[in-house]
Image (cartoon, rainbow, N blue to C red):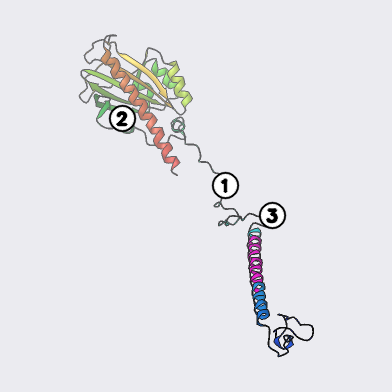
Amino acid sequence: MTYGQGGGSQSQWDPWKPNAQQPSNGDGDGTPDWAALAEASETRAKRRRLLFIGGGALATVAVGAAVAAAVISAGGGSGGHASPRPTAAGPSGSASGPSFEPTSAPPPLDPKDFISSAKKDTAPLGPGTLFGGTRLTMGQTVYTKGPTADTRDCASAVQGTLAKVLTGNGCTRLIRATYTRGGIAATVGVAVFDTETQAARAKGQADKKSIVKPLAGSGVKAFCDGAVCRSTTNSYGRYAYFTLTGFPGGKDVTTKDTKVFRTGDDLAEYTFRQIRRRGEAQASAASGQ
């Protein structure tokens, strides 16, 4: 007897149908075909694995699409590039700080303006402001201050042609001081005018005979009284200043007496500096107001 053969045509086992609907084997005893069942189970397992792999790939594609969409959205949707993080902006929307209108400092005041006219040159003036202290130091040389004088009658403190020059140009005041060193005496006279033009004109009109009177006394012997002395003439601002340097006792000055020339030049330079400082002080005070 052989097994597995029936009287009629043999039906096939369908793995996708429920067990109740499966055909019986050829023996007709209702026993399932175990080989067919095993084959169907393996087929279903393969299909599940394929579906799982396919689903994972679809999920990966979906995640990638979502990330790409997020990048495009962050980049504004135009270039596909993410824009940098925004920085804090001011009220105008820019990243820079608040802006201000450009400003410029006013130009500094010119000190000479304050000593060029009586209207601006209002600081105290006298022998003490122009020739303060008891000594004058120029470099390594020290001079001792002697007598001082101050007069409104300019012609009375000068000699020669200088009286006419000062009076003709409106001199309002003349301040003098004498300094000595090593047997040499020198007097400086500062003539005061209302304007720079008057002082410059007085300087231009002065000649070799335009001389300030030597100021003796207070321990300083008479000098340049009938003797040859050396004189200088200068101006700055509304001031004209004159020096006269020589020897006490009537000795004449010659070109070989270099110390006499040096003394007169030092005294003229010091006077110029004092007048300039006067202008600087007033300009500084005006700038601070």
Magenta-span inclusion, residue 239: no
Q: Amino acid at mark 1?
A: Glu
Compare marks 3 and 2 and give the one earlier in the sequence: 3
Magenta-span inclusion, residue 54: yes
Which label sits on residue 78? 3
Q: Nearer the viewer, residue 72 or 163?
A: 72
Q: Is the C terminus in the top left, top right, bottom left or bottom right quadrant?
A: top left
**How many C-alpha atoms fall within 10 Å of the one at disc 3: few (<14), some, or many (≥20)?**
few
Image coordinates for residue 167, horizontal then vertical, percent: 43, 21
Residue shown at 28% from the left, 27% from the top: 148
Q: Amino acid at mark 2?
A: Phe
Q: Which residue is outermost to the bottom?
A: 29
Q: Tell me how many marks there are.
A: 3
Image coordinates for residue 100, horizontal then vertical, percent: 56, 49
Residue under label 2, please give it: 131
Residue under label 1, please give it: 101
Tell me: 250 left or right of 162.
Answer: left
Q: Which residue is outermost to the right?
A: 8
Q: Secondary structure at mark 3?
A: loop
**How many C-alpha atoms fall within 10 Å of the one at disc 1: few (<14), some, or many (≥20)?**
few
Instruction: State how far apart marks 3 and 2 are (Cα).
Output: 83 Å
Tell me: 67 left or right of 113.
Answer: right
Provide the residue span drawn in magenta: 48-70
Which label sits on residue 165? none
